[in-house]
Image (cartoon, rainbow, N blue to C red):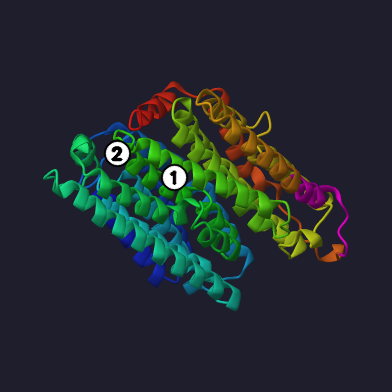
């Protein structure tokens, strides 16, 4: 199935790039969506079976793949809306959809990869496809954004590559030649700890560019701001998930060795600094898209805290990243409607959104409640479990510090959201405000409702997959 999916992706992307016919292009996108869902169901029914030598759909990979499949449908629909409202040329439209499909496929393969070098290849592919999406508007700001993204991602790829070289040195002493995650895990007690330490440090640092953590979080901020909103939604969800699984797999190996405590300290430092950076920016920022982007950094910090502390925190980390995959895209999808109404990203130019788009305003309000993890948000459950794990691990000072920072984030985020919803704009020509179809917000309601459902009434299969994924760490 992996081979069929990869060949199908390449064929569809090629046809999208060269074909100019609108109906054919959208038919190809629908065929890809069917192919992606077929891959998801196939991998779920063939869990833990090695495919195509380098791929193995384990529990964490299948969970993230299903989250990608679910969020891909509204993403492709909002891509269609975006293209339709921007009067794109056939070439620009084809390149946009081809890049989006390549990004989704590269992330899917990275989730399922059982070989660290193969994962590295698909990480590089996400950089290339994301760059095409960031540069979609072909203006000076998009060029600035794409160059920053490519530069930082090139550094991150180099870091991961150096980490892989150090990992091979750690394996060499044990006589291990197979670099699959399964093989490394089987021989974790024979690895050279010095080289393993260096390897973890470089690989973790490299993946921070994708997941959005200190020190390389800046790559994602500009990307989410400059790219079209549907692409920003993917950068804030499935692409960050790819960074998460890269860290999760290498930490899964390290967590069974004597350097586990050292590695968890590294992760906690990065997580707390990430939440601190998000707090500093979110209490001052006026750009709506950047505000959503920094909110994602805050959530990845919380995810990493749960992972590093262990216990129930690992379960909470996986639950949190799945729920975040549904919450954050709903806000980015809604941004398109905000921009159509006010023609601005600045919070200073917007206001009275309830008056101009009632359906969309309710999405923003529910999205704010969800993103800040206030009850009945699904993220409230996962965040509570992360806090519980910090308390049980006696990390009281970190818990207090994080709670203070999150309170400041809620204040900063809330100030901007309530300005958008209720405060009159300084100046606006109401005769030029377009009518927004309420049906364009349906997908956002579904995603937000799904995050609540999975948190408060999770299906047994969903819980079983998370519990199986947790065993990789504990």
Q: Secondary structure at mark 2?
A: helix
Which residues lie in the magenta part? 414-427
* Earlier residue among tags 2 and 1: 2
Front: mark 2 or 1: 1
Residue 445: x %, y % from top left: 64, 39
Left or right, 285 with reference to 41: right
- Which residue is more in the foreground, 106 or 379? 379
Residue at x-position 25% and y-position 45%: 55
Left or right, 106 with reference to 223: left
**Badge 1: how crowded within 10 Å, few (<14), some, or many (20+)?**
some
Q: Is residue 222 magenta?
A: no
Residue at x-position 56% and y-position 48%: 273
In the rendered image, which quarter contains the C terminus?
Answer: top left
Badge 1 is on which residue? 266
Left or right, 18 with reference to 217: left
Q: Would residue 1 be visible to someone looking at this image?
A: no
The tally of labels here is: 2
- Which residue is more in the foreground, 458 or 113? 113
Proximity of marks 2 and 1: CB atoms separated by less than 8 Å: no
Residue at x-position 46% and y-position 57%: 209
Q: Is residue 426 magenta?
A: yes
In the picture as drawn, the residue positioned furthest to the bottom comes out as 140
Answer with the quarter of the image where residue 191 lies: top left
Residue 351: x %, y % from top left: 82, 55
Badge 2 is on which residue? 253
Q: Secondary structure at mark 1?
A: helix
């Amino acid at each position: 199935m992996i081979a069929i999916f990869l060949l199908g992706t390449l064929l569809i992307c090629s046809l999208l790039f060269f074909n100019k016919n609108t109906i054919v292009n959208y038919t190809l996108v629908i065929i890809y969506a069917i192919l992606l869902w077929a891959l998801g169901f196939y991998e779920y029914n063939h869990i833990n079976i090695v495919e195509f030598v380098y791929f193995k759909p384990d529990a964490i990979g299948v969970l993230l793949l299903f989250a990608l499949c679910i969020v891909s449908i509204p993403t492709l629909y909002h891509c269609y809306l975006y293209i339709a409202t921007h009067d794109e040329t056939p070439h620009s439209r084809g390149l946009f959809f081809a890049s989006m499909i390549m990004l989704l496929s590269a992330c899917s393969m990275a989730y399922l990869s059982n070989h660290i070098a193969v994962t590295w290849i698909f990480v590089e592919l996400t950089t290339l496809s994301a760059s095409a999406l960031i540069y979609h508007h072909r203006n000076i700001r998009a060029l600035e954004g794409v160059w920053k993204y490519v530069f930082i991602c090139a550094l991150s790829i180099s870091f991961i590559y150096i980490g892989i070289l150090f990992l091979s040195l750690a394996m060499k002493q044990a006589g291990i030649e197979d670099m699959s995650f399964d093989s490394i895990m089987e021989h974790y007690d024979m690895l050279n700890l010095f080289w393993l330490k260096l390897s973890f440090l470089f690989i973790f640092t490299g993946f921070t560019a994708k997941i959005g953590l200190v020190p390389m979080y800046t790559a994602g901020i500009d990307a989410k701001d400059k790219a079209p909103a549907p692409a920003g939604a993917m950068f804030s969800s499935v692409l960050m998930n790819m960074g998460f699984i890269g860290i999760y797999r290498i930490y899964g190996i390290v967590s069974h060795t004597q350097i586990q405590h050292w590695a968890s300290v590294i992760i906690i430092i990065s997580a707390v600094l990430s939440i601190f950076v998000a707090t500093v920016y979110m209490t001052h920022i006026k750009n709506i898209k950047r505000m959503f982007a920094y909110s994602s950094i805050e959530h990845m910090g919380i995810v990493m805290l749960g992972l590093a502390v262990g216990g129930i925190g690992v379960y909470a980390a996986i639950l949190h990243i799945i729920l975040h995959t549904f919450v954050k895209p709903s806000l980015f999808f809604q941004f398109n409607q905000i921009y159509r109404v006010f023609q601005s990203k600045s919070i200073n130019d917007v206001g009275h959104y309830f008056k101009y788009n009632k359906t969309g305003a309710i999405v923003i309000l529910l999205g704010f409640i969800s993103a800040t993890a206030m009850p009945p948000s699904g993220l409230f459950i996962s965040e509570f479990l992360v806090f519980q794990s910090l308390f049980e691990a006696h990390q009281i000072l970190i818990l207090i510090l994080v709670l203070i920072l999150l309170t400041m984030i809620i204040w900063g985020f809330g100030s901007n959201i309530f300005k958008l919803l209720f405060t009159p704009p300084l100046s606006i020509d109401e005769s030029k405000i377009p009518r927004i179809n309420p049906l364009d917000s349906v997908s956002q309601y579904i995603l937000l409702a799904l995050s609540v459902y999975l948190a408060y009434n999770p299906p047994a299969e969903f819980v079983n997959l998370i519990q199986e994924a947790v065993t990789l760490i504990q």
